[in-house]
Image: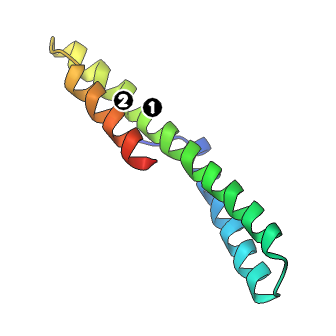
Amino acid sequence: MEYDDAIKNRLKRAEGQIRGVLNMIEKGQDCRDIVTQLSAIRTAVDRSIGLVIGANLKSCIEEQLEAGEDPSDVIQEAVELLVKSR
């Protein structure tokens, strides 16, 4: 599976945010600001998870349908991954 640049860029942005939070901690900044940034990071990661699962689900369903197979198991697995990620 190939991932598009949007997913990669989203994760690189989260990586930069993590470095920023570490810097904030080292400087002893207010915990409210740190928690705000950590929440933004969590949101970015959660959205990335959704994009990855969605892209893979689409690809897997297409493969199942082309093979004349029922995609129910693939859909169930995607749902379980989403639930597990929370």
Callout 2: 10 Å neighbours few (<14), some, many (20+)?
some
x, y percent for residue 18: 66, 69
Note whether 58 is above or below 19 in the view shown. above
Q: Residue at x 58, y 43 (%)?
A: 47
The residue at the point 15 percent across, 15 percent down is 69
The answer to whether 44 is drawn above or below residue 79 in the figure is below
The residue indicated by pointer 2 is 57
Query: Mark 2 touching mark 1, by CB under 8 A?
Result: yes
For this view, does 33 lie left or right of residue 85? Answer: right
Amino acid type of the residue tagged 2 in the rendering: Leu
Residue drawn 75% across and 73% down?
A: 20
Give the image location of residue 25, x and y in percent: 74, 83
Query: Disc 1 marks which residue?
Result: 54
Q: Which mark is residue 19?
A: none
Task: Give the x, y percent position of residue 80.
Answer: 32, 38
Could you classify mark 1 by the number of other residues whose Cα lies within 10 Å: few (under 14), some (14-19), or many (20 or more)?
some
* Figure label count: 2
The answer to whether residue 1 shows anywhere in this view is no
Please tell me which residue is depicted at 53% across the width and 40% down the height of the picture.
4
